[in-house]
Image (cartoon, rainbow, N blue to C red):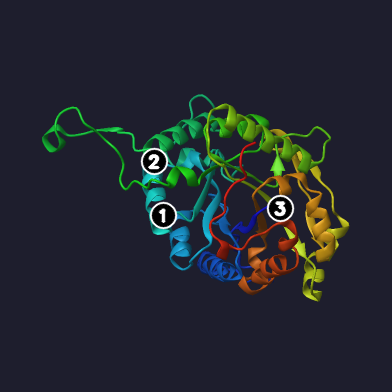
Amino acid sequence: MKAFGFLSFGHYADVPGSATRTAGDMLKQTIEIAEGADEIGVNGASVRVHHWARQAASPMPLLSAMAARTKRIEVGTGVIDMRYENPFQFAEEAAALDLIADGRIALGVSRGSPETALRGYETFGFHDEEDPERGSVLAREKFDLFLRAIDGEGLAPGDPRMVGAGRYLAIEPQSPTLRDHIWWGSGSRATAEETGRKGLNMMSSTLVTEATGQPFHELQREQIDLFRAAYKEAGHTGTPRVSVSRSVFPLVSDMDRAYFGLRSEENADQVGIIDGFRSTFGKTYAAEPDVLIEQLRQDEAVMAADTLMLTIPNQLGPDYNLHVLESFAKHVAPALGWKPNTEGPVQGYPIA
């Protein structure tokens, strides 16, 4: 592990105990957390993207504001659901964001997780004739178009009266660094290998769509190894990035113990069904800092990835969430190999 960031699910609800009652609260508080995290030295600030729910849904305005209000931290998503996106508009917005942020972005993209709406992407106007229930074919076709667009391929026939005969036009703006900042959200061996073949970065969350009886971190580590092997076999020569997400809470105050102390007694992986797949869900880490260090050192996926994303309880408000991030930065991260954002952009591990 070289770096760590935070991942906010962007929940908001007008309920007792929540410091995030409205969408406006959530958006402004996320920016505030990103600003504070930037000063602490945290490397990444990301948001989940969900539609038809009281959560963050339209990330580009939020990420633009976060990038404009920070200096070093990387801003991104985990993940944008391609079923809901127009690939060409998304390509324009992503390029603009990359330029605004001077390359400080990490856009996680995938087919997306289950939504509260039944095939909600159809209400957005998008249909998958081959896989109508899950939209996986639609997502991949649109993502391939998105990659062609950000690579500068001419995709729209030009009006010969305006640009001459036979010309095809590329989207604008173009950002030459954008493709290096695209991540695919992978949860299986097959998607890990496909991500490597495409030469993208790999983002893995707190679940994998496998349940073999092995510990979660071992399954995830195997997927990381498959990704890197496929990246090399495809002939790519870069240093791709890998991130994994975990719920991690250093217990350094009475408030920490009140919120999360019981989690340390429920420290185990879980197996369940998500989106029709038998899946393994990672455990929550909540312990004293010295215990956390040893636990995370034993987590093979955390130590194999260059970046660890901490899922934060955003409804507890900016002050508490910055306390969690600062506690991790001060008491845990240095022992795991962390380099703060003041030391420059995060680099992936070289492919062996």
The x and y percentages for residue 316 are: 67, 69
* Mark 3 residue type: Arg
Query: Mark 1 sits on what residue?
Result: 97
Q: Earlier in the sequence, mark 1 or mark 2?
A: 1
Q: Earlier in the sequence, mark 2 or mark 3?
A: 2
Which residue is located at x 49 percent, y 67 percent?
A: 70
Q: Residues within 10 Å of mark 2 (few under 14, many from 20)?
A: many
The x and y percentages for residue 305 are: 67, 46
Q: Secondary structure at mark 3?
A: strand
Distance CA(mark 1)–CA(mark 2): 12 Å
Residue 242 lies in what quarter of the image?
top right
Residue 192 lies in what quarter of the image?
top right
CB within 8 Å, label 2 to label 3: no
Which residue is located at x 53 percent, y 29 percent?
A: 235
Distance CA(mark 2)–CA(mark 3): 31 Å
Query: Mark 3 sits on what residue?
Result: 246
* Mark 1 residue type: Leu
- Please, which residue is most extreme toward the left here? 161
Q: Residues within 10 Å of mark 3 (few under 14, many from 20)?
A: many
The x and y percentages for residue 25 are: 54, 69
Comparing 135 with 3, the one in front is 3
Left or right? Give the position of 170 relative to 231. Answer: left
